Image (spheres, rainbow, N blue to C red):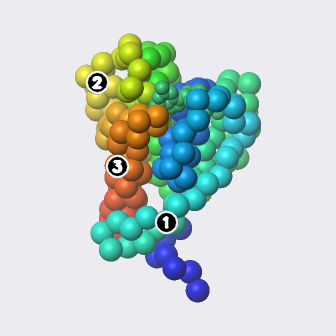
């Protein structure tokens, strides 16, 4: 017997080095490392959370964002229920690319709940909160700024995604 009500496939996408692995590890294991090891294909982690009295097993598909590994990605998207689209607040180009990342997920998974995440807020930023919010608004998705390093808003991002998943399921029922 499973001890959760839902099994949720969460896609974590965005350009290489924006902090997808760091956010996912911080959330699932509580750890952070300065080292950068490029993800090839996908890393899988999981965590059970409770949202509005419902237990859900989040299956965290942390994908590799480097250009050279990108042709591997579409096969990992299949069956994705929701996702985080991540950019680095010190790298404006990574925000611009989020429009493309959202398009990729939508192409492979349909219109699933997504959140735009501006990560690395502990560093000197090159992208303002307003710029991030404006891109999120134009995509019609929520926006949260995080730091995997100092833990700011990491739990909040994943639990909001859990809430959005539940809402989406209820609307579709
Ligand atoms: P790919 O696997 O290539 O797609 O990269 P990624 O998006 O998974 O990035 P990763 O989590 O590996 O982080 C890249 C680098 O940024 C590492 O050196 C991390 O320590 C660092 N990093 C990630 N998040 C933060 C953060 O919030 N603040 C700071 N200061 N550094 C961070």
Q: Position of residue 95 (x, y in %)?
A: 44, 23
Tell me the residue at 30%/18% (across/down).
128
Residue 116 in view (yes/no)? no
Q: Earlier in the sequence, mark 3 or mark 2?
A: 2
Q: Foreground residue, 172 or 88?
A: 88
Tag 1 secondary structure: strand
Q: Which of marks 1 and 3 is nearer the N terminus?
A: 1
Tell me the residue at 58%/29% (across/down).
34
Which quarter of the picture shows residue 172?
Answer: bottom left
Tag 3 secondary structure: helix
Pair 2/1: label in front: 1
Residue at label 2? 129
Q: Where is residue 80 in the image (x, y as percent from the top left)?
A: 56, 53
Badge 1: residue crowd in 10 Å (few <14, some 14–19, many ≥20): some
- CA separation, marks 3 and 2? 17 Å
Tell me the residue at 55%/52% (across/down).
29
Which quarter of the picture shows residue 51?
Answer: bottom left
In the depicted structure, whether residue 89 falls above or below residue 6: above
Residue at label 3? 156
Residue 6 in view (yes/no)? yes
Q: In which quarter of the image is the N terminus?
A: bottom right
């Amino acid at each position: 017997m499973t001890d959760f009500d839902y099994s949720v496939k969460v896609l974590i996408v965005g350009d290489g080095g924006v902090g997808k692995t760091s956010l996912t590890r911080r959330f699932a294991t509580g750890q952070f490392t300065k080292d950068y090891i490029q993800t090839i294909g996908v890393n899988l982690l999981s965590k059970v959370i409770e949202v509005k009295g419902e237990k859900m097993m989040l299956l965290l598909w942390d994908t590799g964002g480097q250009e050279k590994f990108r042709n591997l990605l579409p096969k990992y998207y299949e069956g994705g229920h929701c996702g985080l689209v991540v950019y680095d607040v010190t790298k404006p180009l990574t925000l611009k690319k989020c429009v493309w990342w959202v398009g990729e997920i939508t192409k492979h998974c349909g219109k699933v709940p997504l959140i735009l995440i501006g990560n690395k807020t502990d560093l000197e930023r090159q992208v303002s909160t307003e710029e991030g919010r404006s891109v999120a608004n134009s995509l019609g998705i929520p926006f949260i700024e995080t730091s995997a390093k100092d833990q700011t808003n990491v739990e909040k991002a994943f639990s909001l995604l859990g809430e959005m998943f539940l809402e989406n399921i209820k609307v579709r029922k």
